[in-house]
Image (cartoon, rainbow, N blue to C red):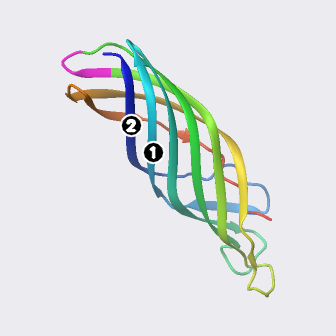
Amino acid sequence: MSGWYLRGDIGYRWYGGGPSAAPITDEKFSGAVAGTLGFGLKYHWFRADLTYDRGTATNASATTSVAATQPQYTAKISSQSVLTNAYIDFGTWAGFTPYVGAGVGMSWLKSVNYLDTMVAPPPNGAIEAGKSRNFSWAAMAGVAYKVAPTCCWTEPSAPLTRPLPSLSA
């Protein structure tokens, strides 16, 4: 079946700290709930869509080897992404359709409540909000199940890679 489609996703994100620059010795990020809306076109075994993704803010913290009060850096980071995705479906058997896909786009990150415990008041080491824009990409594989003639349930494995900003000043 070919034609236009709408999509909506909800999920949970697990973040991992990346390589840290000195003097940071450890970074921690809390998880976040995320939602995605999009639309696309399916033509036989090929699908393409455009998606908008937004997540709740994640709490970020970093410890260092220099500050007496740890963690030295803390912030809340929110994210939004727009991706263009392409998928290949590998046929349908008993309602199940395995697929692979990839996407590229941009992410916008905003940090608020940034605090550096090494900075003296006022205002208690708080630093104004920061913003960044980054290239993002996704690689995915999964299986879709047709629950009705015009509705599919999808179990994807889709890590979205968006570089998180450095917490150090």
Give amino acid for label 1: Thr
The picture quadrant where one finds residue 126 is: bottom right
**Quarter of the picture holding the C terminus:** bottom right
The picture quadrant where one finds residue 65 is: bottom right
Secondary element type, mark 1: strand
Q: Are marks 1 and 2 in contact (CB under 8 Å)?
A: yes
Q: Tell me which residue sits at (70%, 55%) in the image.
A: 165
Residue 121 is one of the magenta-drawn residues: no
Left or right of 18, for residue 103:
left
Image coordinates of residue 70 in percent, x first then y, are 67, 76
| Pointer 1 local density, CA inside 10 Å: few below 14, some 14–19, many at least 20 | some
Whether residue 166 is visible, yes or no, is no
Q: Which residue is mark 1?
A: 36
Image coordinates of residue 1 in percent, x first then y, are 30, 15
Q: Tell me which residue sits at (51%, 61%) in the image.
A: 30
64 versus 107 height, above or below: below
Q: Tell me which residue sits at (63%, 60%) in the image.
A: 27
Whether residue 84 is visible, yes or no, is yes
Image coordinates of residue 57 in percent, x first then y, are 54, 62
Part of the protein shown in magenta: 93-97
Numbered circle sitting on residue 7:
2
Secondary element type, mark 2: strand
Q: Nearer the viewer, residue 59 or 151?
A: 151
Q: Nearer the viewer, residue 163 or 23?
A: 163
Left or right of 91, for residue 46:
right
Q: Tell me which residue sits at (52%, 28%) in the image.
A: 85
Image coordinates of residue 150 in percent, x first then y, are 25, 28
